[in-house]
Image (tube, grey):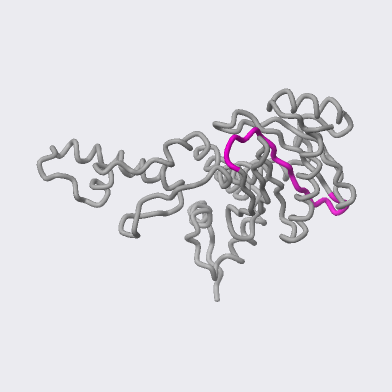
Amino acid sequence: MTRRDFSERDIHMALDGELPGEERMAYDAWLEANPEMRAKSARYIADRAALRAALAGVMDEPVPARLRQAVLGEAPARTPAWRSRWWLSAAAAAVLIVGGFAGYVAGTGGIGREEGADDQLAEQAIAAHVIYAAEKRHAVEVAASDKDHLQTWLSNRIGLKLVAPDLAAEGFELVGGRLLPAGERGKAAMLLYEDAKGERISLFVTAESSEAAKGTYAAEADGPEAVYWLDKGYGCAVVGSLPRERLSEVAKSAYGQLLAGISS
């Protein structure tokens, strides 16, 4: 069987979950062999997370009836032609925004989907990890060699007491950290860790006022996974491509140290 050539269109299909399963391994190999396309995939993931964060309030609202009618072709017959075309374009844009580029279409039982604060946190964390964990020279703004300054700087910026967890027992050493935008949350801190084999994980921390929650989340199959907690004013996600059980153990250690740092 001849392997077909992939293109940028396939990146969008993969992110929307529309790439045929039997093509996934070949697509992943193609992406790995094409740094430019791999960078585009990472950028699209980050753009999607940033858009969802910026439009979080809108995404939770139902699609107005007039826009739904326009998408379904049920616009009132008396509407002028120019107006119908305008509403159709607006409706299509609204569906893309509310659906979060998830490939929802009319006739599947609803337009768009609701997304909780925990999923949004996890997506932001994964997007940041995909972009910065792959960087060799510019992965962090402040190196681990200046750990005290790193902790103080990020704590002041995100408005939370941040203690960089010691993950040496789990096989990871702190590389450093950076400050990131976090949509409605304002700002987030990202701490990057690396093991002896060069495998990297990241810790994404921001202020969070939502109800307590915890779980795991993956933006795409075979991509990095986030183990997250929302509790005690913290939103925390540990992201990596480790086996789920190991990632969960590392995340528990990191989060336990974060909470212990509040009272220290």
Rendered image quadrant of residue 90: top left
Residue 43 seen in this snapshot = no
Residue drawn at the location 35% of the way across and 60% of the way down: 108
Compared to residue 28, the image places residue 73 above or below, namely above
Q: Nearer the viewer, residue 221 or 214?
A: 214
Compared to residue 66, the image places residue 150 above or below, namely above
Residue drawn at the location 24% of the way across and 46% of the way down: 70
Compared to residue 59, the image places residue 25 above or below, namely below
Compared to residue 149, the image places residue 212 above or below, namely below
Task: Judge left or right: residue 145 versus residue 53.
Answer: right
Percent position (x, y) of residue 33? 67, 56
Task: Judge left or right: residue 228 versus residue 66.
Answer: right
Stretch in magenta: 195-211
Asked whether 103 falls inside the magenta stretch, the response is no
Percent position (x, y) of residue 6? 53, 59
Residue drawn at the location 72% of the way across and 37% of the way down: 190
Rendered image quadrant of residue 145: top right
Task: Name the image quarter holding the C terminus.
Answer: top right
Percent position (x, y) of residue 48? 52, 43
Percent position (x, y) of residue 211? 58, 41
